[in-house]
Image (cartoon, helix red, strand yellow):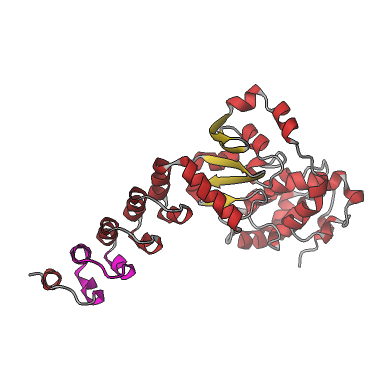
Amino acid sequence: MINFKHYLIERVDIEKTLKQMGSKLEARIKSDRTATDARKVIETALDSDPTPNKQYALWILRTYLNKGINLFEDFSRTGNALEIFHKHKTKMPKKDINQIKSLSELENMVEAFSDTLSGKEEKAVLSDKIKKETTFVYQSGKDVILIPKTEAASCFWGKGTKWCTAATKGKNEFQRYDDQGTLYIIIKGGKKYQFHMETDSYMNDKDQGLKTNAEMNTVNWFFDKMGEKFQINTVAQNAYGILRIKNPSEKVQLAAIQRNGGVIKYIKNPSEKVQIAAVAQNAYGILRIKNPSEKVQLAAIQRNGDVIKYIENPTQKVMDLANGK
């Protein structure tokens, strides 16, 4: 068993720590899509520690091993939280960092001490530089959809959130996400959200997946404001994006079906055209269609004759096609 207190020294020795914790870290990162190797994890823990003597680095590593920090990319969030904790330690309900078992517990504890800007202050701070580094996609009153084009803009608009793309201490993950595709920040009803289509990531300000009706309504609102063309591009990349779109048009449905015919099961009352496209892409999609028309049956048989066994009361024309006549 690793004695973590033994390593709470002025500076973590990377090689020594790697020798002691390397195998456990390697096992841990197998379940983490954002991590690559143990050395990188240790180095990033050091970078994320805001103190000169790196007194919290091993807490980061231990908490990560115990899954109190869910993902390696969340290390970027620890710097902000630890800086506030260290600054106001004497006022904290738990003054010993080792009593805190997770990043979310730490963040909740320091939230009351974090510096946030009021609306007036934000306007005062919003410099020409940030404006130039931001694309405003939609703006109506206090409701905004924007695209941060730089890390600085991402940090500005993400202030007060727990996003790794808004981290000002440790490693900021903005560039990694931006390299994959556009990052959207939504401000609606006084709440901040961050959406990234390429990773199917829809997060609230606490960096948690959306669950409440109000949050899900924000997703519907976002897609509505972005328009049909954007919706088509989204489902063309990830067909399951159609689950996020309320009342998708036939064009959007067809784009999703062309990507993955299986999503027919998520489309309410699909038209015959959509049904035909679904079975043409995946014949077994006919299992998801109630009372398919003869045209739909024929399209499915043309794709794969074996699905004849799943068609109730096929017409003679459909049977002949299945039998190769």
Percent across and percent down for residue 225 are 49, 41
Residue 289 on the magenta span: yes
In-image side of 61 versus 307 (left or right): right
Q: How many marks?
A: 0
Q: Main secondary structure of the magenta part?
A: helix
Locate residue 274, reporting x and y percent: 29, 56
113 relative to 320, above or below:
above
The N terminus lies in which quarter of the figure? bottom right
Residue at screen point 64% across, 51% down: 207
Residue positioned most to the left: 325
Q: Magenta segment, which residues?
A: 283-311
Q: Residue at x 64, y 45 (%)?
A: 189
Residue 310 to residue 114: above or below: below
Compared to 293, does 34 lie above or below?
A: above
For the question of whether residue 313 can be seen, the reply is: yes
Q: Is residue 171 left or right of residue 244?
A: right
Asked if residue 86 is among those painted magenta in the image, a careful observer would answer no
Q: Is residue 220 left or right of residue 14?
A: left
Quarter of the rendering occupied by the C terminus: bottom left
Q: Residue most toward the right? A: 90
The answer to whether residue 44 shows anywhere in this view is no
Between residue 34 and residue 202, name the one nearer to us: 202
Q: What is the quadrant of residue 323 in the picture? A: bottom left
Left or right: 61, with 201 as reference point: right
The foreground one among 83 and 7 is 83
Q: Quadrant of residue 313?
A: bottom left
Q: Nearer the viewer, residue 277 or 33?
A: 277
Q: Residue 211: x and y, percent?
A: 60, 59
Q: Residue furthest top?
A: 128
Instruction: Determine the image quadrant of residue 21.
Output: bottom right
